[in-house]
Image (cartoon, grey):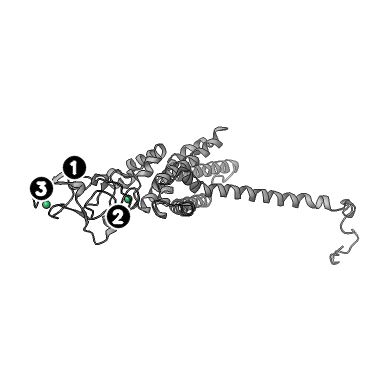
Amino acid sequence: MRCQTCGYSLFNLTQPTCPECGTGFHLHDFRFEPGTVAFACPFCQHLHGGQGELYTPSDSQTALCNACGREMDIDHMPVVVLASDPDKAEAVPAEGVPWESRRRNGRFRSLWATVKLCMNKPGAFGKRLAMTTRFNDGYWFSVWVQVPQTLAFAALIGLLMLIFFVIGSNASQGPGSGQSPLVVAAGLGIFAFYFVMMCVGLMIGPLIYAVVLGGAAHLFLSITGPKRGGFNLTAVSALYGTGPQLFAPLAIILMFVPCVGNVATMILPVWSLVSTICILKEAQRVSGLRASFAVLILPISMMVLGCLTFGLVMWAASSQSYGPHYSTPPATTPYFVPAQPPSAPPHSPIQSP
Ligand SMILES: [Zn+2]
Ligand SMILES: [Zn+2]
């Protein structure tokens, strides 16, 4: 249970105001983990359990004390940690990210709701991220969001291999034509290898993305001023920002449409970056400019580095292929003279000029 503005712990308070920054709060702003906290009566300190979806003492603003019978304002009830591990008692904002309640509402419904929020209202998305948002949630969201494109790529490779095999068997018409079982098995083996590698990439990709992009963004935020949360919050913002990738199979289809293709493949990555900027801005409570630079610093520097490398390679290639032609005097390399006289005996050693 932390202040939504500054992250200060709000347990055991008799006043509904953050002692650190003075921001007021309501008990109904939070969703508590059942059994991990209790709510003390402001008059007799009797402990009450929670109820309902949010696990608060009452659905309304007031409740009657079981011990002294007085009417309590629930916002004035100190929240007492019961769990031996205080981290287990951490409450999340009442209106959390849909993906976080996927076990209650179903995985696919929660995934869809989260992707919609990420693409349409990334700012509101960022506000819902708690200080205690788990890395695991962001990671599994990013994995599931990229399942369709992994399957689409697998289908594409399978289709290409099938076409290759059909053409191959048609080309070798004649006695004993048709694919031998060995060739078919080899083809299936190659496909299985690709598929396994894609699955490994699917599992490792979001981790690398979170550490590399999140790391660069967090380093930038750390250097340039104050922010609300730690690296975890930045990494989770980056992972939730991958939401638009759910539509990647559409982009793969559009890739084959002339003219539209190049633009179509750019839409989703750009949308992802824009969403990530908006989520990070609200999650870390930083300015839009800082959030933009934090998220874009790595893609931009990689693009610049890529252009420089490309330029260097082109320069090296051109100086290698054209250099000798201009520098070598034409008289010393007469192409029409044989390198060795035809009369030389076959066993003679090669003579150097
Ligand atoms: Zn505060
Ligand atoms: Zn009481």
- Dot 2 falls on a residue whose secondary structure is loop
Residue 47 spot, x, y in % from top left: 15, 55
Closer-to-camera residue (347/321): 321
- Dot 3 falls on a residue whose secondary structure is loop
| Residue shown at the point (54%, 33%) measured from the top left | 260
Residue 54 spot, x, y in % from top left: 23, 46
> In the image, is 110 to the left or to the right of 293?
left
Q: Is mark 1 within 8 Å of ligand 2?
A: no
Q: Is mark 3 within 8 Å of ligand 2?
A: yes
> In the image, is 289 to the left or to the right of 141?
right
The residue identified by callout 3 is 70
Closer-to-camera residue (241/268): 241
| Residue shown at the point (29%, 50%) measured from the top left | 18
The Cα–Cα distance between marks 1 and 3, rounded to whole angstroms, is: 14 Å
Q: Are marks 1 and 3 in contact (CB under 8 Å)?
A: no
Pointer 1 or 2: first along the chain: 2
Nearer the observer: mark 1 or 3; the answer is 3
Q: Are marks 1 and 2 in contact (CB under 8 Å)?
A: no
The residue identified by callout 1 is 61
Closer-to-camera residue (148/72): 72
Please, what is the three-letter code of the amino acid marked with disc 2?
Ser
Pointer 3 or 2: first along the chain: 2
- Which image quarter is the C terminus in? bottom right
The Cα–Cα distance between marks 3 and 2, rounded to whole angstroms, is: 28 Å
Closer-to-camera residue (242/252): 242
Please, what is the three-letter code of the amino acid marked with disc 1?
Gln
- Dot 1 falls on a residue whose secondary structure is loop
The residue identified by callout 2 is 9
Label 1, residues with CA under 10 Å away: few <14, some 14-19, many ≥20 = few
Q: Which mark is residue 198?
A: none
Please, what is the three-letter code of the amino acid marked with disc 3?
Arg
